Amino acid sequence: MSEPALAIEELCYRYGEKVALDAISLQLDRGEFVAVLGPNGAGKSTLMALLTRLLLPATGSVRVFGHSLCRQPGAALARVGVVFQESTLDLDLSVEQNLHYHGALRGMSARSLRPRIREELRRFGVDDCARLRMRQLNGGHRRRVELARALLHRPSLLLLDEPTAGLDPNVRRSLRDHVRELCAEDGVAVLWTTHMLDEVEARDSVVFLHRGEQLASGNCGGLLARHRAPDAHRLFDKLMAVAP
Amino acid sequence: MNAAPYWYCFLGILGREARRFLQQKSRFAASLVRPMLWLAVFAAGFRSALGIAIIAPYSTYITYEVYIVPGLVGIILLFNGMQSSLSMVYDREVGSMRILLTSPLPRAFLLACKLLSGAIVALLQVYAFLLVARLFDVTPPLQGYLLALPAVLLAGLMFGALGLLLSSLIRQLENFAGVMNFVVFPMFFLSSALYPLWKMRESSELLYSICQFNPFTHAVELIRYALYGQFNLPALGLCSLLTLLLLGAAIVGYDPRRGLLRRKLAA
């Protein structure tokens, strides 16, 4: 049996006395799309920092394709692509230079990177911007470059922290479509955090977070039916009403 | 172990440092103008006030310009170390540090690459300055330029490691002015960069002792000796040891369990 793309068990994190995440567990299989939903301050960014080893958990474990993030960080991180909520591009470098730098950090040679960069920029429709400085690009294009960059090393697990924040509805939709294509066609597992509840579809797996607690998780359509909620917004309200 | 990914990673980090440096033309100009001002103005004013006896490693009487050039090389390296530290704090604030830290390669290796890249960029500045210094009749023997290379690189690594450690401790960019006031200037003035230590001893035994403990003094003396074809073993030992200690402390500072990221995310 193949290992799940991501297996999180009983993950806890505290900032001093304040509990940021409390016993979070979830599993993500190849090609699966899971949305982590919650308002600002729910713990989504802390979860992302733990999944990328910017922070280490107080207790609990994270495994990426069977590799423990704590004990085998190199093997685990090699399979992961990330887009953080805040832009992490170097605005003084060109699009190409940013991508080259990222690839090099993952041990890729300049020769192997050149075709990959062209391919990924083309996939996101920004190949004509390759030589432009990042500063010259608008927010939507910068996000696409970040997605292209996250895919350079062909990750099998993509972690996206509020990737559509600050973008207009058309760009949001187009990014969502691209990512869903990745799941369906390339078998990439995607963990997508967002506070915009309209970004999930009934077929998606979802995890509702609130103040670090996992309120509910499962298939979105199933949860809607079980709680007799017409949409994700109402569902979240209902879950909040019974939250401790 | 396959070494190729490590090599490509180093090349990538070095390329980014070099590109950023070459794109910031004002930074290159400032790194040259600053020591030139000391050499052209300060040294001219002090030449008559400060007589220099024959001291090692020089074999004859020297002008004050000749004396302060190794110290000015030191200040270029120290400024560069602080500059790369500043860029680490900046990278952290704008988020691009996360890209470095989420690389699957070991974090200690990434920080060492960053350090070495910064020191190589500093080498370019130092040799540009040494060439210009020839216009001021500072003409060390030609083989001195070659012999000074490892000394300059080591001093660059030491100050880079100090910068790296500071960057792991500083929370915000705004705190950086304090570093300049409390680290750079005291290190520069309380050293053998501008005056030989026996001169300092004549005025204060305490200041003399502080100068002797200052790592900047040892870096400057290492470079001074190497530039004139001599080897200063105690300075080499001390600089090597300090570089390792500072880098080790910086690696601990960037550890996800205790470092800045924990504080930054908690803020």
Image: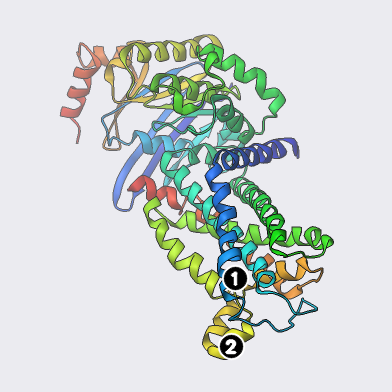
| Residue A45 versus residue B232 in the image, above or below | above
Query: Residue B133: x and y, percent?
Result: 68, 60
Say which amino acid is labelled 2.
Answer: Arg
Pointer 2 and pointer 1 on the same chain: yes
Farthest-out residue, left: A241
- Give the image location of residue A9, x and y in percent: 43, 35
Task: Name the foreground residue: A40 vs B53.
Answer: B53
Q: Nearest the camera: B20 or B193?
A: B193
Q: Is residue A21 above or below residue B179?
A: above
Q: Which residue is mark 1?
A: B44
Q: Chain of mark 2?
A: B
Crowding at mark 2 (Cα within 10 Å: few <14, some 14-19, many 20+): some
Check the picture and name the quadrant holding the N terminus of chain A.
Answer: top right
Q: Secondary structure at mark 1?
A: helix
Could you tell me if the residues under marks 2 and 1 are in contact, i.e. CB atoms within 8 Å?
no
Q: Which residue of the protein is positioned furthest toward the right in this rendering?
A: B143
Q: Which mark is residue B152?
A: none
Give the Cα distance between marks 2 and 1.
23 Å
- Tell me which chain the residue with mark 1 is part of: B
Q: Which residue is mark 2?
A: B201
Element under disc 2: helix
* Among the 4 quarters of the image, the one containing residue A212: top left
Q: Say left or right for B237 vs B107.
A: right
Q: Earlier in the sequence, mark 2 or mark 1?
A: 1
Which quadrant of the structure image shows residue A44?
top left
- Give the camera-side residue of A189 and B176: B176
One can see residue B264 in this view: yes
Horizontally, residue B41 falls left or right of residue A220, namely right
Residue B45, image x and y in percent? 56, 73
